[in-house]
Image (cartoon, grey):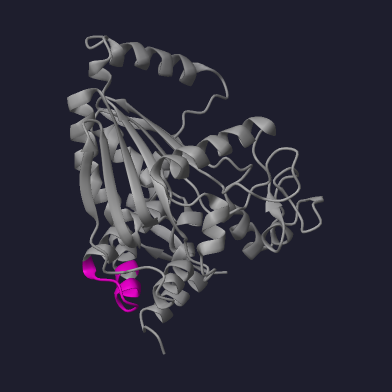
Amino acid sequence: MTDLVMTEMEIQQLVSDCLMANGCNSENAAALGRTISAAERDGSASHGLFRMPGYIASLRSGKVDGCAEPTVERISPSVVRVDGKRGYAPLALEKGREALIDTARENGIAAMALVNVHHFASLWVEVEPIAEAGLVAMAFTTYKPAVVPAGAKKPLFGTNPMCFGWPRGDQPPLVFDQASASMARGEVMIAARDGHPVPMGTGVDAEGALTTDAQKIIDGGALLPFGGHKGSTIAMMIELLVAGLTGMDFSYEAQVNDNNDGGPPNGGEFMLAIDPNKFGDTDNWLQHSEEFIARLASMEGAHIPGNRRYANRARHLVDGISIKESVYDSCIEFTKGVK
């Protein structure tokens, strides 16, 4: 496959053109464009233009309202509720961000429940701005059954990603974003597309046998949780935080209620924001934590989460972003709308 080189702004525009040709208004299209282009910019191809077929399918089927107008409500002193009105998550997240940050600064800690959203993106895109604002941030969301609980035979949990952001003053925040599964499903899908094997322990085939064949995992198989029962309990926790607290669907309910058009199901998301200046170490928390991070970074072979993304970001700003020509061509077809 050959590659094209694009800028972040060109990717944003391409996404907006695709979405608006298929029923999105400009505000929703722009928010999603910012999310997808950020993923490509930072080297997360599995959550970039690769996902456009699913987004377009969900618009064309009518499952997602491309003109949704999210509402933001503070339902208690420390809880913000954002109703996405059956739209994509990025606009709802952008609309609720300021309220979450303000509430956390007022109370020391705040939670945000997003409901009636269709989430299909990386979590770090939405956590990073909160950490840049000087707050500790966490985010969790679910999907449809794709992960087998430890000891079970069939999938019940979604890939159930979780994200954590830690502010670092004038430096870019420390942010990690990881699935509860052994590998993000999007990465497995890319491996299947490109004909690459995945590590043993990533998933099972339709008969429940361990396999390195990514296509067999996608076609009737399932992913395994990372770390066996430990990843399994984290996936369970995320189901309860996202669906149990908000009233939205658990992953197995999302599968029943979804039209299976290939796009994201309707669901929820749970976020936390914490103001470190309200936890009793106002004068020292940043320096103290930086000493810890420096100690970690000094250890041979140690990895600081987010550094790879930041390096990709800096490189792509200079060199441009490589996009597979086949992916670009499919997006150009989407800009023509429904034939």
Instruction: Name which residue lies at 54% across and 68% down.
Output: 260
Q: Residue at horizontal 57%, vertical 24%?
A: 301
Q: Is residue 34 visible?
A: no
Give the left or right position of residue 133, taking residue 136 as reference. Answer: left
User: What span is colored magenta in the figure?
Assistant: 15-26
Q: Is residue 307 magenta?
A: no
| Quadrant position of the C terminus in the picture | bottom left
Tell whether 34 sits left or right of 157: left
Quarter of image, res 28: bottom left
Provide residue 211's location: percent of width, then percent of height. 78, 51
Q: Is residue 6 above or below residue 110?
A: below
**In this view of the protein, can residue 197 be seen by the observer?**
yes
**Quadrant in which residue 40 is drawn:** bottom left
Q: Position of residue 122 (x, y in %)?
A: 43, 49
Q: Nearer the viewer, residue 8 or 106?
A: 106
The residue furthest bottom is 339
Q: Tell me if 197 is positioned left or right of 31 in this view.
A: right
Residue nearer the viewer, 123 or 74:
74
Name above or below for residue 251 compared with residue 309: below
Q: How many numbered dots are placed on residues in this image?
A: 0
